Amino acid sequence: MSPMPKVAVVGGSMIGLTAGLVLRDLGCEVDVYERSRVPLEGRGVGIVLHPQTVRYLLDNRLLDLSAVSTSAAYHRYLADDGSVLSEDGRRHHFTGYNTLYGTLLRAFGRERYHLASEATGITQSEDGVEIEFAAGERVTADLLVGADGVSSFVRRAMVPDVQPRYGGYVAWRGVVDEKDLTPETFAALDDSLTYYFRPGTHALTYPIPNYDGAVEPGRRLMNLVWYRNVPEGQPLADLLTDRSGRQRDVSLPPGAVRDEYLTDFRDTAVAQLPPPIAEVALKTAEPFLQVMIDVEVSRMAFGRACIVGDAAFSVRPHAAAATAKGADDVWALSDALRRSGGDVPEALRLWEPAQLELGRALLARTRDLGEGAQFRGDWVPGDIGLTFGLREPGDSADMRVT
Ligand SMILES: Cc1cc2nc3c(=O)[nH]c(=O)nc-3n(C[C@H](O)[C@H](O)[C@H](O)COP(=O)(O)OP(=O)(O)OC[C@H]3O[C@@H](n4cnc5c(N)ncnc54)[C@H](O)[C@@H]3O)c2cc1C
């Protein structure tokens, strides 16, 4: 019999699937339980690549990243009129959520990937953990891994007093086909991670693969992320009320934003953004948005259960490293299980301190970056501290993709 534990992973997005694969390779028997009734798609639009995010796929030669990723050789900062304030040679690679999720899911297979499985109850004993699902089914495991995202049920069950904290602004997001951009705008944004900031707002664009997978310049999508301050309370609640009158909590998907806010989005783009970035905003067919919230926990391990990825620390996107952090949680868990010979409580004791430290440090850095851009207005064009990275700014730049 394998000394490695039987594992139930709750949440089947990128980090849940990474956990499924890494722990299965370690010798664990793993099932992944996902609330959604259908395979996930299209979320997050663009993902900035970091070595840890794609470590499993590269180690196992499951993905030719050069064929499915775009890249930008420069960090470019624009002035109000669209002229270049500063430009530095720092290459980043980008891909789409679907590419990574789809490849992870194919690698894990569908046999032990359970859709329509919403965890609703957890009971622990010294010997195991029992998970109950909305449909009434129960399963038992030696280890429960909560990879169920920012609104994590596992976290709420383990540390109910932890509350997400609103950062005071939202990220508007959207994509435009590069072929629909004017030649001037294409040239202004090409081969670049392009930033613009002014007091109270900042925006960035970068190229990502098109829906059909095209990664050649001119056939890709230009991805826009535009951060705008929204006061807490009624203004935020009203913005998050969708076309059907339902108030959402952390995001509004494409097609859900009400007309008055779409009009405001476009008017403000013209008034506040430099012409090339404003054009991307104006040509975005269905802008959608995500609320910037911080989640911080003081524990990630609870007997035979643990939380990883956004379920533990939900950080702002300014370091583009949340997925990398979640993957790091998973790889470290695998190392700890190996070191403990499969003893779950011992492995979680070994694992927790460094992952708490990583989560806290990333949260602090991304919070500081967000406040610097949105409230203090102290970003300096070309500052290396603004560069994407997991453990430090810049550690996701210039990665190898072959
Ligand atoms: C504007 C923006 C830009 C970003 N850009 C980047 C980037 O460039 N690079 C990067 O690394 N990250 C980026 N991120 C962050 C990234 O999207 C998340 O960190 C990442 O998707 C988290 O993965 P996860 O698997 O932990 O959680 P999620 O992707 O949120 O998945 C959680 C899963 O759990 C399921 N679930 C929830 N509750 C239950 C339950 N009770 N039972 C069963 N299943 C459940 C959900 O259906 C979902 O599929 C960005 C985020 C934002 C907001």
Image (cartoon, grey):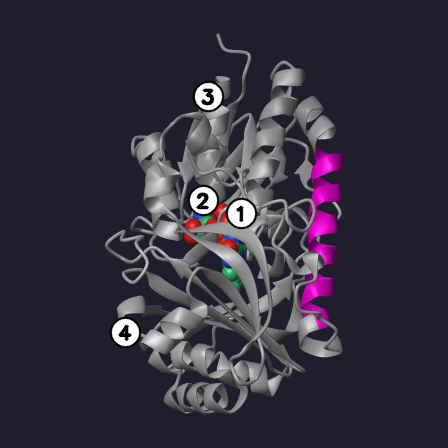
Report the residue at 68% width, 62% height from top. 163
Find out if the beta carbon at label 1 lies less than 8 Å from the nearest ligand 1 atom. yes
Q: Secondary structure at mark 1?
A: helix
Residue occupying image coordinates x 71% and y 57%: 385
Q: Earlier in the sequence, mark 1 or mark 4?
A: 4
Question: Which numbered tag is attached to residue 116?
Answer: none
In the rendered structure, which disc, 4 or 2, sits on the residue that comes first in sequence? Answer: 2
Judge left or right: residue 47 versus residue 235: left
Gap in Å between the C-alphas at discs 1 and 3? Answer: 20 Å
Q: CA distance from mark 1 to mark 4?
A: 30 Å
Residue at 68%, 41% in the rendered image: 300
Residue 150 position within the rendered picture, expressed as x and y whole percent measured from the top left: 56, 56
The answer to which of 153 and 307 lies nearer the viewer is 307
> How far apart are labels 2 and 3 at the CA level?
17 Å
Q: Which residue is mark 3?
A: 25
Q: Secondary structure at mark 2?
A: helix
Picture layout, residue 312 above or below residue 254: above
Query: Quarter of the image containing the C terminus?
Result: top left
Tell me the residue that label 1 is attached to. Answer: 323
**Amino acid carrying mark 1 in the image:** Thr
Residue 106 lies, in percent from the top left, at: 31, 35
Q: Which residue is mark 4?
A: 180
State yes or no: Cβ of the residue under disc 2 lies below 8 Å from any atom of ligand 1: yes
What residue is disc 2 on? Answer: 14
In this rendering, position of residue 146 left or right of residue 348? left
Q: Are marks 1 and 2 in contact (CB under 8 Å)?
A: yes
Label 4 Cα neighbours within 10 Å, binned few <14 / some 14-19 / many ≥20: some
Mark 3 lies on a secondary structure that is helix
Position in image of residue 247 (x %, y %): 47, 77
Say what amino acid the circle numbered 2 marks.
Met
Against 172, residue 94 (above or below) is above
